Image: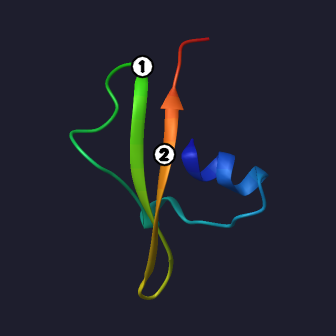
Amino acid sequence: MLSEILAKEGFDIDRKNIVIKGEGIKEVGNYTATVKIYKNIKVSVDFEVYSE
């Protein structure tokens, strides 16, 4: 879902280039993902998971 949200914001990032730190998302809360945007360029993206 994170790659879909980034696409809506104008960033075409393949989901294989997104790594979520830790053991994955198992509950609501704040998380950090590392996104590889080009060969040796990576950025950290903070995001929040919440229930609908």
Q: Is residue 30 above or below residue 14?
A: above
Question: How many numbered circles does the render carry?
Answer: 2
Residue 3, position as x, y percentages in the image: 59, 53
> In this rendering, would 11 be left or right of 30?
right
Residue on which disc 1 sits: 28
Q: Quadrant of the C terminus?
A: top right
Q: Is residue 8 above or below residue 12?
A: above
> In this rendering, would 5 be left or right of 22?
right
Indicate the amino acid at tag 2.
Asp
Tell me the residue at 54%/13% (across/down): 51
Q: Residues within 10 Å of mark 2 (few under 14, many from 20)?
A: few
Tell me the residue at 68%/67% (across/down): 12
Extreme residue toward the top, this view:
52
Residue 23, position as x, y percentages in the image: 21, 39
Q: Secondary structure at mark 1?
A: loop
Q: Which mark is residue 4?
A: none
Numbered disc in front, either 1 or 2: 2
Query: Which circle's residue, 1 or 2, is located before the other in the chain?
Result: 1
Q: Quadrant of the N terminus?
A: top right
Q: Residues within 10 Å of mark 1 (few under 14, many from 20)?
A: few
Figure coloring: rainbow
- Which of the pair 38/16 is nearer the observer? 38
Tell me the residue at 29%/38% (across/down): 24
> In this rendering, would 47 be left or right of 30?
right
Q: Which mark is residue 46?
A: 2
Residue 43, position as x, y percentages in the image: 47, 67
Indicate the amino acid at tag 1.
Val
Q: Secondary structure at mark 2?
A: strand
| Residue 18 quadrant | bottom left
